[in-house]
Amino acid sequence: MVKLQGTRVFGGYAIGTVSFFDNKKEAVERRHAADPSAEEARFNEAREKAKAELQALCDKTMNAADDESAKIFEVHQMMLDDLDFEDAVMEGIRTEGVNAEYAVQQAGQNLSEVFAQMDDEYMRARAADLLDISDRVIAILSGKKKKTLSPTDEPVILLAEDLSPSETVQLDRSKILAFVTRFGSVNSHTAILARSMGIPAIIGLDFDAAMDGHQAIVDGYGGLLLTDPDEETLKHYEERKQQDDEARALLGELKGKENITLDGRTIEIFANIGGVDDVEDALRNDAGGVGLFRSEFLYLGREDYPDEETQFQAYKTVAEKMNGKKVIIRTLDIGADKRVSYFDLPPEENPALGYRAIRICLDRPDVLRTQLRAILRASAFGNIAVMYPMIASVWEIQRLKELFAEVQGDLSDEHIAFSDEVEQGVMIETPAAVLISEELAQEVDFFSIGTNDLTQYVLAADRQNPRLAPYSDAHHPALLRAIRMTVESAHRYGKAVGICGELAADTLMTEFFLQLGVDELSVTPSMVLAVRDAVRKTDLRG
Amino acid sequence: MQELVYILTDPVGLHARPAGDFVKAVQQLACKVTVEKDGRTADAKRLLAVMGLGAKGGDAITMHFEGEGEEEACRMMQEYLSQHL
């Protein structure tokens, strides 16, 4: 199996055979033309033909309700008529005395470079359009047919160096599972097309043309191409693809709809995210907010603690992208199975019951202070809440709240903007937190039940040990009672309670959560609509 | 000579197709028309030159009209800009 990384343009999964589209251009010959006015006439004639071709493409794409492509071809026609383009071609023919083909190629390249150097990424992508129009005219002048994709019987994962708008529009779309290109940009026509077709696309991926004909997986979300996958990987991606397909099918039906039961009970459905890139998935799946923003990604894979500015930028970006929707940031949950070298944590006999999360933070308050400063600064740019993991005692949250107030005071003294409405909540994931949930409810603004850890602690079954899987029963009555007790405690003091573990996405549990009056479920982005679907089919009157 | 200053409200600004429509509109005018952004000036009848300014929503552009029917041209473009860009 070979695994290659590129840049994601559009998410989704594809599994199929790779087809390499070899569209290398043939060199244009430079010749001395004896009669410049004959070359000018050839150019004018070819340009008219090119415009007619583009008009036909424009009509064809318009009929296929592909407005994006139609617009591109309309612009191509205008570019062909552009006086700068014309002047450049005429200049080549008259002053350099070259053939029309060569003059057109030079004009296209020179103008394309001007765009390629612009600051604006969208404009840089237009460089490809100029090369595309000059190629079209050259093809007409030289009487050579442009290469087209050879028709295939089976839909394929298309690999190419880059695809011009003209090439992409000639593709039989029912035969393309995904696009993977070595060059191109997120604003290129291939990218626009992939988005409008809703199929995965990756750019900037350094593939090997010899992959042609091999089986592969495209993970558009991760920007990954996996060729010759082993059975286990294949099975894993088949499952993810199925889930994703189901989520997409629901998307058309349920996007923009309320999370409301048949008898009128509503619930919030938020998304869990693990990084800035996941926000797009959350929004695309119509999540009402972010119920769990795992901040560990900022700490993992580094040599040293992330500074305040790095964290601030990440939190601010997410808050802004969510555009006023709530974003609950969980303070760092390092330790147990998540190890980070620079934290210099000693090995433990029993890491799940060990030195982790706020236990580290309370010991090293400066680490948390930096994070809280970044979170509070970001709160000026959106609707942010903060949540502390691994709470087992009332004194812990009291100490955390003191720290939070100190940071607020520092920021005020420094005249740094932050929102003074940032809510503080705790994760309920230890049996102790459940048992003292009444006391905790009086200290915080909200609860979020972390069912993964709560399951392992309530049932005393290490979730890292696969042999204990039969004992990690997330539907165990002990766990359900723990959830009920937590919800009741929160509501007794008028506090909101959410669920952010995997159980939140378990649609067998949706009715139970609705009956309890849980305020919010936070699930992986691809499950948001599946849970909405379950909510909308539930009737609590029965 | 007539001068017209306009702040683009369309967030995409003078990108490919809006720029194409803009140029088409200007090409109907008999007078010489230029468009300027941040000190760079382009012939408003040339698409690639106009696109090359990279004018986006919120940017101010200044147009100059010189020659036959310049007053009428300025009025027409004022209206065009407020309707389309």
Image: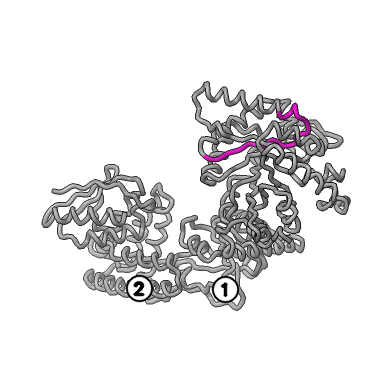
User: Considering the numbered disc 1 on the image, is that residue within a helix, a strand or a loop?
Assistant: helix
For the residues tagged 2 and 1, is the chain the same? yes
Q: As drawn, which residue projects farthest toward the front?
A: A541
Please state if A180 lies on the left or on the right of B44 as rendered.
Answer: right
Quadrant containing the C terminus of chain A in the rendered view: bottom right
Q: Give neighbour class at mark 2: few <14, some 14-19, many 20+ (Cα, 10 Å).
A: some
Chain at tag 1: A
Comparing A469 with A111, the one in front is A469
Q: Position of residue A43 (x, y in %)?
A: 28, 70
Image coords of residue B34 (percent x, y): 22, 51
Residue at the location (51% across, 35% down)? Answer: A380
Q: Quadrant of residue B75?
A: bottom left
Work out how far the residue at label 2 is from the one at label 1, CA to CA, in angstroms: 25 Å
Residue at point 79%, 39% (across, down):
A434
Mark 2 falls within which chain? A
The image quarter in which residue A200 lies: bottom right
Residue highlighted by disc 2: A55
Helix, strand or loop under label 2: helix
Q: Between residues A135 and A50, which one lies in front from this camera angle?
A: A50
Identify the residue position indicated by label 1 in the image. A175
Judged from this view, the residue extending furthest toward the top is A413
In the figure, A244 relative to A401: above or below? below
Residue B50 is marked as none
Instruction: Return the x and y of residue A493 as percentages of the image width and height.
Output: 69, 37
Q: Which residue is painted at 85% across and 50% down in the image? A: A477
Q: Over which residues does the magenta segment extend? A: A382-397
Say what amino acid the circle numbered 1 marks: Lys
Q: Amino acid at mark 2?
A: Gln
Residue A6 screen position, x and y as percent: 58, 54
